[in-house]
Image (cartoon, coloured by chain):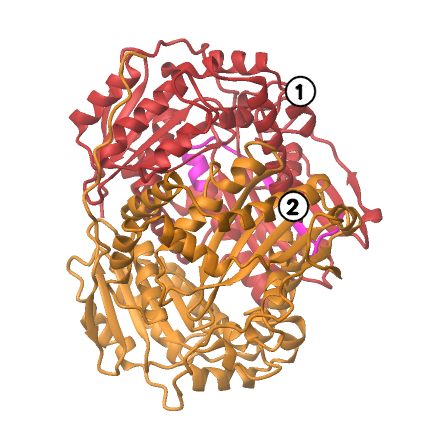
Chain colours: A red, B orange
Amino acid sequence: MPLDYPIHRRTLPNGMRVVVSPDHTVPNVTVNIWVGVGSRHETVGRTGFAHLFEHLMFQGSRSVRSGEHFEALMAQGARLNATTWFDRTNYFETVPTGAVELALWLEADRHGFLLDAVTQENLDNQRDVVKEEKRQRYDNQPYGNALIDVYAAVFPEGHPYHHPTIGSMEDLDAASLDDVHAFFRAHYGPDNTVLTLCGDITAEHGFAIVERYFGDLVARAAPRRPDHPQLAPLEQPVRVERREVVPNDRLHVAFRLPVDETDDFIAGAVALDCIGGLATSRLVRRLVRREQTALGAHATAWGFVDGASLGFVVLDVAPGTDPDEVEAAFVEELEGFLEHGPTAIELEASLAQSERSWLSALASQEERADLVSHYLLLHDDPGVVNTHLDRLRDVTAEQVVESARRWLRPDSRATVAYLVADDASDAETVTTEDVA
Amino acid sequence: MSAPRPDVTPPQPWTFPVPVEHVLGNGVRVLAHDLPGQYVLSLRVVVPTALSAEPDGKEGVGAMTARLLDEGTLAHGSEEFAELMERHGMVLGAGVSDGGLLVDVDVPQRHLRTAAALVTEALAEPAFPEDEVRRILRNRLAEIEQERASSAHRAARELARTLWHPDDRASRPTAGSTETIGALTRDDLVEFHATAVGPQGSTVVVAGDLTGVDVVGVLEGTLGTWSAPRHRPAPKPVAPVPAADGARVVVVDRPGSVQTEIAVGRPGPDRSSPDGWAPYPVLSFVLGGSPSARIDAVLREEKGYTYGIRSSFRPRVAGGSFVTSGSVRSEVTGEAVEILLGILDGARDGFTDAEVRSGVDYVGKTAPGRYATADAVADETAALALEGLPLDFTTRNLRAVADLGRDDLDDAYRRVATGEWSVVLVGDAATVVPALDGRVGEPVSTVDL
């Protein structure tokens, strides 16, 4: 079934790219803004800053008092938030149709005139809130810092994806008001921002009101640096071991992948699906169902734009099983896949699951708007929402095995092992190979 | 900025979609929502069961039965069944609550017939292969350890144990404990399935774009063939009995924790409450539903002690709870708990007109968006079926929300918040216990993780 979500596109004179995607089935409009700045743009000593900055966007701007953004919109029936990721920062709200202009007015005020209202008090408060977010989501969770170890093991120091979006406590402590001003001036401007309206609105009206509220913003973002060149796969295995108070051993086996939206990335993601992403993947069949040496096996491919993407497999080792045995079985399955490639049934299953999850994402107006902004900002092609599945259908077994042979060789893996420590005093870190 | 702050045009009244109703030959009730543009169909099967009726020493048998439904049937082995689902773009989940067993499927429209046939197999003739039974039980034991290691899960478990009477099933984990799971056998699951899972009283909900789909035809040929001769209807669930000594503070010792997970609870209403359900979602919003709500205005936006603390009324089929939970850094635990209980108690003095307005508007005006997708509509209609509520409940409740005044909120809150709280703190006891001194009125005890 070919998809035909409408995509009307325009660029304002100040450089802001705008898409309107009408859908009148629900009396709501989603306003979704992506700014071309994420943790990949952070400098040494200021990790976590893009995310801390995102919090400050809710603390008032020229004509909006601190907290008013949330309050004013929620009182009109809006559901809203913002998130920061390696490649970008997004801000979004879904509002009843009659409140869409209020949403745009509030967004334009903070995207244009945040610095009029930023105070040391707000910075200090939100720094504390972000540190609690870090403790809640990372430091106080079993395996909570495992992915942070994965980023550091897979990507070399100084690479955009070497450090996590949440940053470090030291760097959060070091953030100053001057940093806030410099960051806003360098990255926040209509020429580094895209906006999607999705929902109960016509293209003509949508463009008119975006122009009304954002048209006066001045293009001023600093020129974007070119993206990093494609990073080659790791040349030899990297291993990081931690002994912690965790309920069972867990292995994270990670690989560098090609950048997002390349044929090679898409084929590599299908390969990871077949190996560990499906409920009937090779790792699930063998380790979870037959040998029962793993409690679970999952694989993920995250597409990034700045010189590399990331693929990883998570293996929960069954109590009483030697994690080395599980890793050896993983390598064996991987080698088998590299030799023979995917079966027709694996390809069919991967495509069927990708189709359902893609259609489910598009079923929600919020997620559809977010996908439009994603492909508009990072790939200048919002129509991907309609063409992505066709592209997946064209992936061949040959492409999958070729991509896997290039990117998923056992020697190119980084393994982060979280192993059960007898008690907290036993906790330690061992890194046996450094990143080249 | 040149453009002035714009006015807002109020939304038109909105109603929750009304499903088309049908009864299959074997008595299964069908509720179908045609939602154009929703290409992934959501299918829910609700089978009334009673958690409280699980045999002594076999707790978790319902949840384990649910997890094994798709792990092999008379017609298909476990792997074969998984492969069939996956190749048809299906995803299936199954679990139990206090009043029912729920099977939850999402599938692209063109595979509805296959999905309905596989769900029928899973419900009518699961094989419970010995290997799969052992695997699923073993995984549950590992899951219990993973839940123990997570502060939020551990807090929820301890809160249930503190809030409810020790003889009440609600005081113990729905999916069973190490002891009860360890005692389960394949025969237990087979017997539970034969007697507790059947078409009588069950409902199937289908939501999504039904253009060109013969829903009744598809379901008559699949779920309409389901029979279970030994099935006995479940007793009607009753509200859990609160613990006599529920008003106390329990510290769960988790040495080295950098945060303390806080959970504060009280018994609460279900959605059939004779006093009406309308005030409760509004109270959740006003107390703990946003950064500007009473709790986060202080603990997050003023003090910076937390990433966020949420309050919610959690209805069961019968009875429910009012739970406020979130985490704060360890050093401020004593002060944070004192402030939090102060806010929860202080709210018994009443809410402001502005709070009532903002909460009423938020709950009412977000409804069209909250119920905009097939899965959200299917979930709500399945919940109505499970709770025995009329199909216009959601719409009537929204009307009632719009009419709420200050007195309605004040009265509803005072019915629940009597000043006696069950408080659970999961954190480093050596730091937390001394810090509570003089800050909480209730007795404090400490338990192991």
Whether residue A381 is visible here, answered yes or no, is no
Chain bearing tag 2 is B
Front-lying residue, A135 or A272: A135
**Residue B213 percent across, percent down from the top left:** 18, 62
Q: Residue at x 32, y 51 (%)?
A: B404
Question: Is residue A198 toward the left or the right of residue A254 in the image?
Answer: left
Residue at the farthest right position? A425
Q: What stretch is highlighted in magenta?
A: A244-267
Q: Name the residue under label 1.
A: A174
Q: Which residue is drawn at 28% across and 23% down?
A: A18
Which corner quadrant holds the C terminus of chain A? top right
Question: Is residue B15 toward the left or the right of residue A164 in the image?
Answer: left
The quadrant where residue A3 appears: top left
Question: Is residue B257 toward the left or the right of residue A205 in the image?
Answer: right
- Amino acid type indicated by mark 1: Ala
Whole-Å distance between the Cαs marked 1 and 2?
31 Å
Q: Is residue A161 above or below residue B377?
A: above
Q: Few, some or many C-alpha atoms within 10 Å of disc 1 (few <14, some 14-19, many ≥20)?
A: some
The quadrant where residue B243 appears: bottom right
Chain bearing tag 1 is A
Front-lying residue, A128 or B187: A128
Q: Name the residue under label 2.
A: B338
Q: Quick check: is B4 in the magenta stretch?
A: no
Front-lying residue, B347 or A203: B347
